[in-house]
Image: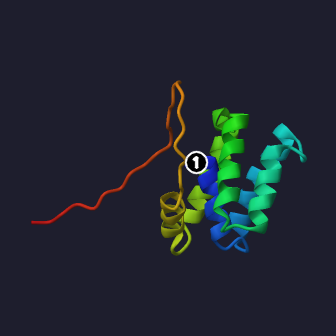
Amino acid sequence: MDPITTAIVAALASDLTKTAIKHSYNALKSAFKKKFGSDSDLVEAVNGLEKKPDSEGRKATLQEEVENTKVNDDPDILQLAQDLLNQLKDQPGGEQVITQTISHVKYAATSGTGTASIGNVTEHQASEGN
């Protein structure tokens, strides 16, 4: 899952009553509205997911709109998403919310050609003691 979709899904799975999280979430959503308009498919996908945050179909729609708009190419919006993820990580259980959000993504198999790049991925692995 891309960082923007991950941030939104994780935020909706967390406690949006926390001031810092709510502020970061609203800043990201405001950036979408400013760049694409309040009636854009991307903003509508976020609004739809807010109504049903557990809907896998709505998560997939959001991810599709993030890809269609190429919003992941905007460094300012990526920074807002990262700020939101950082706020979520700082909350008790926040890392678990983010990890769970990422691990419950289902990808559909498609065919085609092209180039793909993945950025802002961090992997943590526990070391084994002898």
Q: How many marks?
A: 1
Place of residue 90 in the rendered image (x, y in percent of width and height, measured from the top left): 54, 66
For the residue marked with disc 1, what is the amino acid? Pro
Quarter location, residue 71: top right
Q: Dot 1 corresponds to which residue?
A: 3
Residue, x 57% and y 46% (percent of image)? Answer: 2
Vertical placement of 23 versus 30: above or below?
A: below
Place of residue 107 in the rendered image (x, y in percent of width and height, measured from the top left): 53, 49
Q: Residues within 10 Å of mark 1 (few under 14, many from 20)?
A: many
Quarter location, residue 68: top right
Along the horizontal axis of the image, is 88 left or right of 24? left
| Quarter of the image where the C terminus is located | bottom left
Residue, x 81% and y 58% (percent of image)? Answer: 47
Vertical placement of 28 versus 129: above or below?
A: above
Instruction: Give the farthest residue toward the top.
Output: 114
Q: Nearer the viewer, residue 24 or 39?
A: 39
Place of residue 27 in the rendered image (x, y in percent of width and height, measured from the top left): 76, 53
Place of residue 24 in the rendered image (x, y in percent of width and height, measured from the top left): 71, 58
Residue, x 46% and y 45% (percent of image)? Answer: 121
Along the horizontal axis of the image, is 27 left or right of 104? right
Along the horizontal axis of the image, is 65 left or right of 33? left
Does dot 1 land on a helix, a strand or a loop? helix
